[in-house]
Image: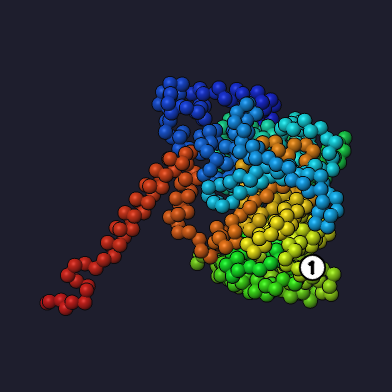
Amino acid sequence: MKPFHLLAVALSASAPSARFTNAQTNVGCDSSCPPVGYENDSSHLCVGSNVDAFASSRVHQICHPSNGNNGNSNNNYLCTLVKALEYKLGGETPELLSKKRTVDVSKDQDGNNGNSSAEVYGPVALSPFFPGNTFEVWTLPSEDDAADDENNDETSTNRNDNTTKGGIAVVLGAGNQSFLTLMDVLDNCLRHRRPVLVKHHPLREWLAKPYGIMLAPLYQRGYFAQVSNIGNDATRALLSDPAVGHVHITGAYKTARAVREILSQTRPHLSSNDVRSMVTSELGCATPHVLDDGSYTDAELRHACRTIAFGKKANGGCNCLCAQAIVLPRRWAQKDRFRSVLFDELRRQPTMPCYYPGSVERKASIVLRCKKAGTKCTTVIAPSISEETLVRDRDQVVVVECGTPGEEGYNPEPLLTEAFGPILAIVELDHDGSDENGDYIPRTAVPFLNNKENIFGSLSCSIYTPASNNGTEHNRQGLQSAVASLDYGAICINQLNILGYLTATKGGKWGGVDALGQSGNGNVGDLYGIIGSNKTAKAVVYGPPLETKPLFDLGNGPPNVVLDALMEIVCSPSVYSGMVKVFKLIVTRSVYGIVSMISHLPMIGGGCGGKSEG
């Protein structure tokens, strides 16, 4: 059977650390990855080797990433990994680690005792491509604070690492985004030092060819193999094989549960904790976007709604970090104005098809149950993302008014599962309405969100707060208390939660934190080993003030030439070579535009309205 043939290929990497050491000195004639500095000395390469071809190839970028600031998640991950290895070998301390402080979180807003303190790393800039955005990593002692704190390397077995010694890692690829599986391969292979076998999702079988090119250095050394969709029976057989020591899933909660059941049935000698440690997963969330109480300017309201609408409509709502719940203060004076602006943005930003299998049906089922319960459901019609793309009513966003918990008519249905489609729920939380106290989020919103009987998952969330709330120390402390108390893996302030994922490529982490495992188990990232074996952690992104125009807007995208230029920079092995390609691109487009314009000019002496002789 083909998958087991490839399994044998992956198993050839039985001693990862030794294989990596040998790979570093492998610069022979059949080497597909020239060493650093080859451009200055090509004597070790074979006669006729095309050095320039290596320099411009993605294969070379995988081997020797140029820098960590070109906006590409996979390249950023590789660059940060290199910095982490250099640091472990006595090199320069990374900026994130150099900015460490202790924050007292021993008491909440009501004076109740909590965790004694949090270790906070950062803030550091997230990326030049996202100016004004910084991030921190917050760590708190976990319940298992008696664990060995020194066991903090890639071979530790804990709730954050989840490494099972020996065997290969099977990565069940994501179906909604192409880069996710590549990140999962790099994380398992390079951070955890596991040989990896990828089973591509049926929607992404075409990735096998580009992955084969980009990951050729790992494949040729026996660290990577891949198969296309092989069906449920073959997948079960693959997971049942004793050679498999780890499974990583990006998908649905029920898929992760099914994988654990297969592992338990085929490995009866393992305890439930042993099986749990074999599986890491990223499973999504009913992602909440929380509006702080206070006075917003028109621009702040507009920009918050624009960001939420983008988060809802991108990729047809088929993202693990897709906006699903909006949490409002019930007594907020601007809530009606907010709704009006939100609906305007949902209409203005174009709709993408909801293509993911089962998403349309899930949306229809939720909406049907809500309507039967008397809950207000409003379909917001918007134009298609392009003239060539067909969108139907089923692809349009439905806004569901859940009401207020504890009051008659409250319906939590849209909050209790990940919709993974075009549903946006609004829930209003009651509070005392004292805007000046700055207590709404820590005292009202945080307890609601942390109770998983109220809302599903803990992967990421966003909080929006106006500039008027930053004027007092009490308000700032309230926001800090909320950050410390929120049980979410990524918390973004005045920013779309998608940037929470990017922190995993820069020394932060990505993964859920709830004890129920609704959003998964383990994490991607933590390249500097900040979390360790006895801590829980969250990445916190601080965006620019809400008055700043958002970076994300489906209704006002950049010109195609800008996107093409960014692609050239991102896909080049260095910023310099990328800029050269951008220059060539601009010159070519300019010449083409001039020629096209000239070709449409009327011929001299005719066609200008003059009377012809004859």
Query: Percent x, y for residue 15?
Result: 69, 25
Residue 228, by quadrant, is top right
Vertical placement of 508 versus 542: above or below? above
Of 33 and 259, nearer the camera is 33
User: Residue at 78% of width from left, 48% of height from top?
Assistant: 105
Given the current orientation, which residue lies at the most extreme left position? 614
- Per the image, label 1 sits on a secondary structure element best described as loop
Residue 408, by quadrant, is bottom right
User: Residue at 81% of width from left, 54% of height from top?
Assistant: 108
Query: Percent x, y for residue 530?
Result: 70, 38
Of 325 and 137, nearer the camera is 137
Vertical placement of 292 versus 543: above or below? below
In the rendered image, the quadrant that contains the N terminus is top right
User: Residue at 77% of width from left, 52% of height from top?
Assistant: 485
Q: Is residue 84 left or right of residue 414?
A: left
Q: Which residue is mark 1?
A: 431
Vertical placement of 470 versus 189: above or below? below
Which amino acid is tagged 1? His
In the rendered image, the quadrant that contains the C terminus is bottom left
Query: Percent x, y for residue 352?
Result: 59, 63
Given the current orientation, which residue lies at the most extreme front position? 472
Q: Is residue 49 left or right of residue 310?
A: left
Vertical placement of 578 versus 350: above or below? above
Of 297 and 214, nearer the camera is 297
Query: Percent x, y for residue 157?
Result: 78, 35
Residue 506 can be seen, yes or no: yes
Of 226 and 312, nearer the camera is 312
